Amino acid sequence: MSATAADARIAPPRRSGFEPARALTILVTAAAVLGPLSLIFYQSLLDAPFFEATKHVGIGAYQFVFADPDFWKALVNSLLIASGMTLIAVPLGGLLAFVMERTNLPGKRWFEPFILVPSFVSPMVLSFGFVVAAGPVGFYTVWVMQMLGLEEAPWGLYTVPAMAVIAGLTHVPNVYVYASAALKNLGSDVEEAARSAGASPLRVAFSVSLPLIMPSLLFSAVLVFFLGIELFGLPLVLGDPEGHLVLATYLYKLTNKLGTPSYHLMAAVAVLIVGITFPLVLLQRYLLQGARKYATIKGKAGRMKELPLGPWAWPAAALLALYIFVTVIVPVSGIALRAFVTNWGFGVNLVEAFTLDSFKFVFNEPTHTRAIWNTVLIGVVGGALTVACYTAIGFATHRRNDGWSRFVDYLVLVPRAVPGLLAGLAFLWVFLFFPPLTPLRTTIFSVWLAYSVVWLAYGMRLISSSLMQVSPELEEAARSVGASRGVISRNITLPLIRAGLLGSWLLVFMIFEREYSTAVYLLAPGTEVIGAQLVSLWQGGAIDIVAALSFINIILVGIGLAIALRFGVKLRD
Amino acid sequence: MAELTVQDLHLTYGTNPILKGVSMTLERGEVVSLLGPSGSGKTTLLRAVGGLETPHKGRILIGDKVVFDGSAGSEVPAEARNLGLVFQSYALWPHKTVADNVAFGLRLRKVPSGDVDSRVKKALEELSLGHLAERYPHQLSGGQQQRVAIARALVYNPPVILMDEPLSNLDAKLREEARAWLRELIVEMQLSALVVTHDQSEAMAMSDRILLLNNGVIEQQGKPQEMYNNPQTLFAADFMGSNNRLKGRVAQMDDRRALLEGEGWQLWGRPSATTKTGAEGVGMIRLERVRLAQGPGENRVEPELTTSMFLGDKWEHIFHLGDTTLRAHSADQLQPGRHWIELPRPDFWIF
């Protein structure tokens, strides 16, 4: 740094063009995503399990499925429930988002975690909660019957419309997160204009605010419909008593239908389900891009003023309270009660009926303790490893616009279209018949791998939103002083996204505590997790144990939620 | 010797051409400004030199080493070009201290750690940042952050330092001080610098040479005083200062002068290469060249005073001559009404 500067110049290090780490990351991801899926597709075209010596290629499996009246019933039920829940979740989610995001409802910030609870609690657990709370002999049903002096339950829980209503209510958070994100970007002047023209708050919501976020609502409608097609735990629990099947439960029941493992039939149904869901995923991607475009146009949020509700605060608060009561308090309190009492009904004092027997049984049974331990392990350690893997994939595509990046972009979408139940099935086959992985079949690793692939799209969204927050100039500055890509990733980008990664770890923890369907087919001694255990116990009718395990599961999710709230982790993107 | 040579550089975003054949050189110890309106391609040119954008045609040489050659398809990546780049936003790494920010480039070059410390210390002291070495960027003022960004780019003695709008993030008062300080630093340390700016007075104050870019091509280049006093095109004349514009028709012309005629006025001026008798023309004169006069004479007009503004060190008057607005400065206030003003022939350019 002086007159002799030119002589003292220091040359930067040489750099090589090939990046083996990147190539390996992309290769492993592609294998993990496409391997199991192609196996399902291949299996669906055979007339016997793919590992048997004599098998023929053909479309026999599809012919069988199409000839089965149960399949058509299940398809119709799936479409009915998916449409019904969309019709319920979208307006309700939009309205709740409007109340929470745009109005001055007192104390509303305290409610937000409760609105989001249904998206963190396993659907299996929630549905079970509805059964014990509002089923024919549920706590609340009995109370209501007592109060009104009725002879039988005033509602039926096990019908297709009831399933649509409950699925609709529990999927409100999926609409809520997108609607409220879009409403945040809306300037308050448009609402004030409507207000001064004489519109009531409800009128403002339905005539101005919600129409302006139509692209986001449309996106979430497709999302909810798609989740409706995937539905498994809820129809398994609520549809069973009266024999209503949907696509996923049809597939699940198919295992036992013919007596022998009918892998080719299951694969055919799986391919048919993916045939419905994959276009929906592509449609979501297209709509989300549109929604983002719209949001940036309206992005000049400027001054944000909350809409004064005045006397409308009462109906708004009532709506919010009713939603939280029905969707969160009823099922969760039902499970909590059911786990701690021996019996209930007319004239039973719940305090006298208090018992810890179910928990004692759970903790004395190695299968169940292993399930609890595995669930904690897969959430904490597995979650950390998963976030590490997602981060590696994120770095393989970060700030690159080549063919490989676009390939990975679509690659991570693929598992999104595969319902967890099918992915678990595919991974079961891979672990059974791909020799290098066979020894790991009865370890929790198999479940972890399946979880990580199933939640790839969700996780990558978390990671890339962290990566996008790093200003490109910080990385360019490092390049200009002589840092290669690897050095920039380690020294600049990674330290800067550390907080985001910790938040992602927590969210992945909660997702893994909640997950159940992916582990159903992988369930074996050694791979038990609470979610899959619940499905199997429910089938066996061990209601006491289901209640105790559900309660433990809620506690685990609750711990994650409490830590997230404590450290201000954003529960949504 | 030229430290930096750019030859016929073309760069396109999608189908949108940004640079359409730019050539330039930067000599050792020289400061060159890339000046132009937004969208003229000046930042893109700087980033292409830095290796952060890939042109599709042309050549870039640093010293005698080719770092980009479109026809050979060869490109040296940004991290191997050994340039110093100062970002408009400074782009200081928020998780590293000032000393670590500056040391990063040296560590990447495997400089022994004792040398790293002494060089960082020296660089920080030269920029009066010695006492801030252990601070984090968010604990510094804008001016201090800017100096850290410069120290970071200079510490490994790059042959050329590239600066993208180095002063635009400072507030107006600080900017003038920083301009003088930066010019002094560059001269003292004999740096070769390429500086992007959209502010013509900043460009004139700081640089030895100005490259005026317009729509992806170099409109004119030269020393600041040439650019200001002898613009070759209407765009260059208009961009470099505050001007009066008069639209008219060229009535007469000889080799040294032309007569521009408008509604109720006739003015002699210096013709440009494209001026033709009988064609439409635009007359232009710098505000500070317009003089108040006492009575009629050559190149004088008598417009009506519309309003006056007090600027502190002078008055600015706005006159109307038919449809044309004329502005002029004076030391004193003027009475309402008509006034004679002179647009001296050598200072009146016709394009």
Image: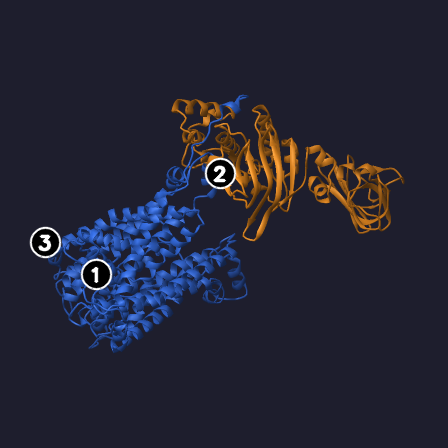
Chain colours: A blue, B orange
Q: Is residue B340 left or right of residue B21?
A: right
Q: Secondary structure at mark 2?
A: loop
Give the residue type that dot 2 points to.
Val
Q: Which residue is mark 3?
A: A364
Q: Which mark is residue B76?
A: 2
Give the residue type that dot 1 points to.
Val
Q: Which residue is mark 1?
A: A520
> What chain is tagged by disc 3?
A
Q: Residues within 10 Å of mark 2 (few under 14, many from 20)?
A: some
With respect to residue A224, does B168 lie above or below?
above
Q: Is residue B48 left or right of residue A17?
A: right
Q: Is residue A495 visible?
A: yes
Q: Position of residue A402 (x, y in %)?
A: 44, 50
Q: Nearer the viewer, residue B249 or A508?
A: B249
Q: Residues within 10 Å of mark 3 (few under 14, many from 20)?
A: few
> What chain is tagged by disc 1?
A
> What chain is tagged by disc 2?
B
- Mark 3 and mark 2: Cα distance apart in space: 66 Å
Q: Secondary structure at mark 3?
A: helix
